[in-house]
Amino acid sequence: MVWQAVLAALGGVQQGYAEYQQGKETKKLLDFNANQYAFLAADALTRGYEAERRLREGAGLIDAEQTAAFASQNVETSSGSALAVTMDTARLSELDALQIRNNARMEAYGYKVEAASSRYQGHLAKKQGKQKAIGTVLGASGKAFAPKPGST
């Protein structure tokens, strides 16, 4: 009877160890996911800044083209309608650039939230694995060494 109790206790220890390992592996996976989300956040910002830069470059070219077109028609470019057109173009271009920047930041923020959530889930998975392991070992030990009905 003693060997049965020992085997039952060892089985509980083995199962508890497996639960602990599962928690650790789940945490590793979730940490990997978190790192991927962090990469995506950085990438979103990089893409956003590059798109903003390209838009500003294009806006500068449009401004130069507008000024050249007005000047070729002998229109004064530093006042009146010509100035209003180039200023309006510059204002709209700046709004577009700011929208691109904001969109990139919001996309990156979403990825950062996902990364934080994944890290926290990993923390909880590891903690849960430990708690399940302890419960399994204690439960198996208690059952293994508990007096059997009618054995006293």
Image (cartoon, grey):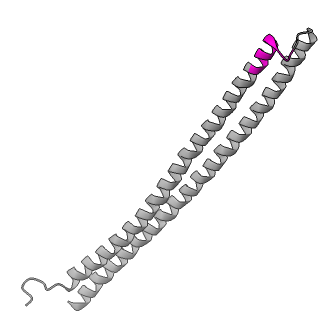
Residue shown at 68% from the left, 39% from the top: 48
Tell me if residue 85 comes above or below residue 33 in the rendering: above
Q: Nearer the viewer, residue 118 or 1?
A: 118
Residue 105: horizontal and vertical position, in percent? 61, 42
Q: Specify whether residue 83 is painted magenta.
A: yes
Which quadrant would the N terminus be assigned to in this image? bottom left
Outermost front residue = 79
- From the image, give the main secondary structure of the stretch colored magenta: helix
Residue shown at 6% from the left, 85% from the top: 150
Residue 151, picture quadrant: bottom left
Q: Magenta region: which residues?
A: 77-87
Tell me if residue 128 comes above or below residue 5 in the rendering: above
**Left or right of 47 in this view: 115:** left
Q: Nearer the viewer, residue 83 or 60?
A: 83
Residue 98, picture quadrant: top right
Residue shown at 12% from the left, 84% from the top: 148
Residue 88: horizontal and vertical position, in percent? 73, 19
Residue 8: horizontal and vertical position, in percent? 27, 81
Tell me if residue 126 comes above or below residue 103 in the rendering: below
Residue shown at 71% from the left, 24% from the top: 91
**Left or right of 124 in this view: 50:** right
Tell me if residue 33 comes above or below residue 79 in the rendering: below
Which quadrant would the C terminus be assigned to in this image? bottom left
Residue 85: horizontal and vertical position, in percent? 77, 15
**Left or right of 71 in this view: 60:** left
Q: Specify whether residue 85 is painted magenta.
A: yes
State how many labels appear.
0
Q: Nearer the viewer, residue 132 or 95?
A: 95
